[in-house]
Structure formats: C-alpha cells, structure tokens
Amino acid sequence: MAVALTMAQMKIAVLRHSLRGERAQMAGTGAALGACLAAGTVYLGFQGADLLAAGYAVWMLGWMLGPVFMGGGDETLRPEYFSLLGLPPRRLAAGLLVAAFVGLSPLVSLVALLGLVILGVRLGVANTLIALPAAVLQLAVFVLLSKVSVGLVGLALRSRAGAIGSGLLNGAILAGLGQIWVFFWAFGQIGVPSAVWYLPSGWGVLAVQGQWWALGALAVLVFLLLGAWAALLNRRAGAVRPATRGRRPMTASTPGGAIVAKELRTWSRDLARNHQLTFALSYGICFAASPLILGWNGMLPFAGPIFVVMAAAMAANLYGTDGTALWLTLMTPGTGDVRGRQLAWLSTQAPIAILLTVAFTSITGGPWPLILALLAALLGGAAGLVPLISLYALVPGTDPHRRAGNPLRTTEDDGGLTGLAYVMLALVALTGAPAALIALRYGWIGVPAGILTGALYYWGFGRLAERRLRTHGPELLNTMRTGRKAETTVTSRYDSLSKKQKTIAWWCLGFGAIPLFPQGIVAAVFVANDMLRHTWFLATYMPPGLRYPVAAAMIALGLTMYTVGAWILKSPKPPKTP
Amino acid sequence: MTPALDINALTKRFGDKLAVDDIALAVPQGSFYGLVGQNGAGKTTALSMAVGLLRPDSGSARIFGQDVWADPEQAKALVGVLPDGLAMPERLTGREVLTYLGLLRGLAKDVVTARAEELLAVLELDQAEKTLVIEYSTGMRKKIGLATALLHAPRLLVLDEPFEAVDPVSAATIKTILRGFVAGGGSIVLSSHVMALVEQLCDHVAVIDKGRVAAAGPLDEVRGARSLEDTFVELVGDQSNGIKELSWLSR
C-alpha cells in the first residue's frame, strides 16, 4: 500500500503544479461540464434503475473511447518513471490504479455514481449500504477499462496493420454510438435496451437492487482487469517502432516541394497518423452508412464530407504534434511552411474524400450539387483551418522522441487537445455552410460557389496562418519547449481588456454558435422539412406564422453575439518587436 | 572588422526568474569562442536569443552586422545552429533530413545531394540508411544536428553542447571538422560545461554565471596562469562552503 500512497501523493503534487493559469481554467470548465453531466446522472437515480444503468453505460463508453479518440488518457504518472524500481507488474499496476483515482475525472465520475446511493436509499437500508462499495468498485471498473483499452490500442499501434485495424474499429464504434437511434429503430426498441444490464456498467445497479452476486462480479472484474493492465504495462517498452521498409528517395527540388515531401512521409510513416486517418475514414463511412439498416440511403453521399470534417479535427494540433522541430522552420524563414503543409494535407485526404463521395453519391444518384458544393468548400476550409487553428490555439506537444510507451499520448494537455478537436469539428463544418445553402436553394450554382469559397478559405486562412507563424514563431517554439504558453512580450489585445469586457467577449464567442446553428440554421431546415416539435429546437414548437421568424431571430442573435465578441477583440495592435 | 556575432544587452525574464541579465558579447570573425557556465546559468537562453529562436525582452543580436530580429532572413542565412535537445523532422532518415533542409536553405538539388552524401559519410551516419531520426541514439542525433548546421556552409556556427553523448571517435572527427572550419576563416560559438574541451579547442572564452557575463576575452587573459577549471570554480563557485561530500555515501 505504501507504493500506492506514494504514487497518489506524487500525482497530487504534479496536479498542484500543472493546474495553473490557462490549464486550470480549461480543467475548471471541463470539471463544470462534467459536474452537470454527473448531476444529470444522479437525477436518473430518482427516475428508475433502467435509466440509471443506461446512464452508466454511457459513462463507461466515455471512459473507454474518450482517451482512444483523443490524447491517450491521463498519464500524469507514466509507468516508465518507475521502471528502474523493479516493482512487480501487478504492484505497479495497483499503485498506478490508486494514483489514477486522484484527479478531476474520477471525482466527477464518483459524483455520478452517487446515483447508486440514491437508488439504494429508495430501496432500503441494506441496499444503501451496498451502494457505497458498489460505487467504488464501479469506478475502479471504469478507470481500469479505460487503462486496458488504451493499452490495447497502444499495442496495436506498434504495427501498421494494428494501427489501421484499430482506427477502423474505433471509428466504427464511435459512429455507431453517434447513430444509435438507427439501431433502436431497427430493432423496434422502445425505452432502454436490455443490453445495458449485461454490460459491467449495469452491475453496480444490479447489486444495489439486491442481486448481491453482482458486487462479487464487479470485484472479480477489477481483479481480472488489474491483471490485464499489469500484463500490458509489461509489454509497453520504449517508443513506437515505425515501419521500416525501403525508402524512396526524395525527388523534390524546391523548398515548397521539400516541405510537401517531408509531410507526406510523416503521414505515411507515423503510425499514430495512420490511425487518425483510418479512424476518420471509418467514422465517415459508418456514420453515413448506418441508416442503410433502415433501408434509407439518403445519408450515404455525406460520407466524404463527414470524413473531411473528422480528419481535420484529428489534425487540429498539426504543429503541436511535431513539437520543437519548429526551430528548423524558424531558422529558414520565408520558405512557405504553411503552404507546404496545406498541400500535403490536401494530397493525403482529398483523393480519399473525392473517391468516397463520387462512389457513394453514384450509388444514391444524388443530390450531386449539394454534395459536390459541400465537399469542395469543406476541403478548402479544412486545409485552411488546420494550420491556422493549430498555430493560434497550439497545444504544446511532447517531442516525438521523448514520448513514452503510449503512442496516443502526444501531449500532456489532453483536455486542451480534445477541446481543440471539437472547435475544429465545429469550424470546419461551418465553412461548408454557405456553399451548402446556395446549393440547396439554387442547385448547381452551389458547386462553383463551393469551389470558390473553398479556394478562398485555403488561401485566406493559410495567409493568416503564415502571418501568425512569422510574428509569433519564437513564442510558439517556447510554448512547445516549456509546455506552457509563453509569457510573451507580444501583448494580446485580450489581456488589455477589463474583466467585464473579457466576460462579455467570452460569452459571445463561446455561445454564439448555439443560437446561430442549432436554434437558427438547423431549426430553419427542420421547419422547411416539416419536422415539427423536434427535441430542443425552439422554432419547431412555434405556431406556423412564428416558426421562420423565430429561427431568423436566433440566427440574428448568434450573428450579433459573434459581432459583439469580435468587436470587443477587434484590431489587435501589431506585435512589437524589440 | 564587424564581429561575427554581436550580442548587445540581451535580457530575458521567465516569470520571477531573470534568466539572462543584460548580456553583451562580441565574437570576432575567425575566432573559436567557448561559452562556459553552470547548469541553468543562461547559456542556452542567451544563444537561443542570439540566433532568433527566443524573443528577448530587450537587447539586440547581430550576425555579421545583420540584425537577427529586424532582418531575420539575411541574418539566419549566415548562421548554422545546433540547439540542445530540440526535435527534428523525426520521420525522415538522415539523408532525407539533409535533403529537406538543403532545399529549404535554397541550395540546388545536386549540391544538396553531394553535400549530404559527404556529411553522412564523414559523420559515419551512412550505415543507418533506413533508420528514421526518431530511432537515432542521442549521439547520432547530435551528429545529424551538426550536419544540418554545416550543410549550407554558413560563416558562423552556434553550437549548444555539441559533444554531449558523442562517442570519442566521432568527437575527434567533429573536432577536426570544426578546427578546419575556423582555419578557413569561419567563426564558432560553442557552449559546454567541459572545461578541458573548451581549453583544448577555443581561443576565446566567456564565463556566464546567473545570467551575467562573469568574465570574457581571449582564453589566456581569462584564465591567466591557472587552468580554466580553477578560474571557473573561483568565478562562479560558492566560496563559503566549498565542494561538498555525501557523508552517507563515502563511508
């Protein structure tokens, strides 16, 4: 136990040092969101055991898939730190498990597991008493499942076949969850599927309900998972081994060509990038194809566009994952690094996207104008936003040669990385909107509009990214080197704002998307298609005469919020160079 | 004559810590200049600012008269840099790294190919033709870093700990290359905490302590009649306590 307690203390010390400044704010925001979800889950405890078990199934999948999807999970204490101590693997795993309980995510999950206690109180004294150990064991199962799934994917990423295989599988699972309604519909399922009771996430609820064996089953599962994790820790050694085939010689003869050649080689040789690419591909195909189960192929043509958006989100930290290699770019100014990366991104992703789109749209026979307009705009938007966002919101990565045995773990700030991926999803999707709207309204004119807007995004965002790299290069390198945002001599306009202005800007830019997209544009599309009384889309609940005005007002509100936010932050002073 | 590297009043503060405090140094053309100091004295920070990798809070740096911060393209073309511990394009082989950088530096394709071939052979990296940089050992990383610094035949080399983790045979090769470079009129700034190495190679030396220049000038002037190590310990050592021992280890 001494080992475990020491590790827990180490973790507390590290968290105390690292959760400062911007990262503390990010973590605080994440914890607040998590607390809302946890409160929602606890509320399910009042509603009934079925819903609670379903809620915990979602938590379990979150623990398992979240780290695989982004950032490789919490690794404040790396197993490598202890490799010279000669601890037996099982003791090491037990120690790391105790340390893994320290942190915000386990705390939030524990709050969510209070739903078991609520359920227990409603059932009786014995049930309440059993709820406490059940909650702890359930949390241990969540944490261990997370560690084991990350370990398994990490193992798969040692070979190209494994990287591609796990990318395909993970993409399919995540897409399946996103389209879960299709499966409910297909199986005529009403209410909560009975499968939630078979998943380990439901065993805590079973135990509280009086099926005492479930508590034992949870304990056995913890024991087995601990063994599996210990075995995986044993297998994890050193850095990932990239594929070593014959090397084709570099044929480029210009600076731009050299950058493209370097990036293309990185795309094909870095197994983590192989994984990302196949993940996005699998996600796009499975998401768009799952309604086929219901005999509806209307979503199929969107596989290509969905792939583009997801692939961009995966590449959101393009500059960060290269780490301090940025110094070479700084030492050779004026070589067009951004343009080279854009071109390389396009030439790896665009052929796949185009092929996918043409093939699937041929199957359904349309709607060609909308799909082609969307694809062109999204490709340009993604190729423009990937370098731009990764330079403006750089999440400092761990240098590739210093990464530990977990190949998914490219940064110590996985919260920031996940946030960045979601921002990228939203922004890239947004770049497709104008062309898609034109195509919906005017048909084929949408296609040139898509090509034009796509080209504009590519050119304009790329230009902004180049400017950022030129003016803030040394600060970005310092961020990468030290792992924290530089206290820069280049003053940001944001810092000079009053607290009130900052709050207003934050709210406007942070939440402007809600009225603009779901409540505005999406609601208008629903109203147009007579999809009324739809979940939380306000306009669809309005009397006929008010539906479009409400959606329009929401769009106006969203645009106003963005304008106000942008106006507060407007015209940053040109950076001072001492 | 314009100094090869002219550092003027460079200052950098990280939070509460003043990492580099008003450092000024002039590296004459054709000199082999050693920068010595304890860990954390500010050597790497000063050199990073001097070559344009870290923005100083104040002060300036000029390479052959070109201001690094006002005129980066001209200044950076004249210098080859080996930073300590920074990443490379990790998924390229050594030859590919050199080809890539040579092209970025604006060299013609055939020149790049010939120079890469020669550098890989001299630094004994041509055995590992299929090995990616990410799989290199620490010593090999230093060597490929040095090759990238030399590739465009700059007139000034700024090398941060170039001999760390390099095996003795390769170190001898590197010393020969560097001496030849200086003999041909090139200038070198090198940081190290190995005094013997600096004494063996350099003709000028600067002692950096707590972010300031404690002493600077031609080697013989700085060390006088003593060894550089004695001078260094006297300049930066903590005189009150002297060298400490571990009581529990030396039974």
Image (cartoon, grey):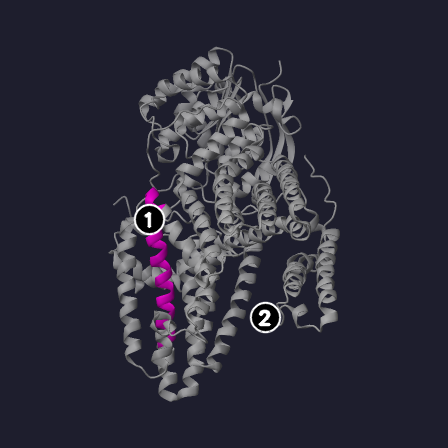
Chain letter, disc 1 residue = A
Taking the image as shown, residue A504 lies to the left or right of residue A361, namely: right
Chain letter, disc 2 residue = A
Please report whichever mark, 1 or 2, sits nearer to the chain's N-terminal start: 1
Indicate the quadrant containing the C terminus of chain B: top left, top right, bottom left or bottom right. Answer: top left
Task: In the rendered view, tell whether residue A405 sits above or below residue B125.
Answer: below
* Residue A295 x %, y %: 46, 61
| Name of the residue lying farthest toward the bottom | A124
| Camera-side residue of B1 and B151 | B151
Q: CA distance from mark 1 to mark 2?
A: 40 Å
Q: Is residue A76 visible?
A: no
Task: In the rendered view, tell whether residue A80 sits above or below residue B46.
Answer: below
Task: In the rendered view, tell whether residue B90 sits above or below residue A375.
Answer: above
Give the residue drawn at x 37%, y 85%: A127
Q: Amino acid at mark 1?
A: Ala
Location of residue A334 (image quadrant):
top right
Q: Which residue is mark 2?
A: A535
Give the residue drawn at x 34%, y 21%: B124
Magenta part of the chain: A134-163
Q: Which residue is mark 1?
A: A156
Location of residue A219 (image quadrant):
bottom left
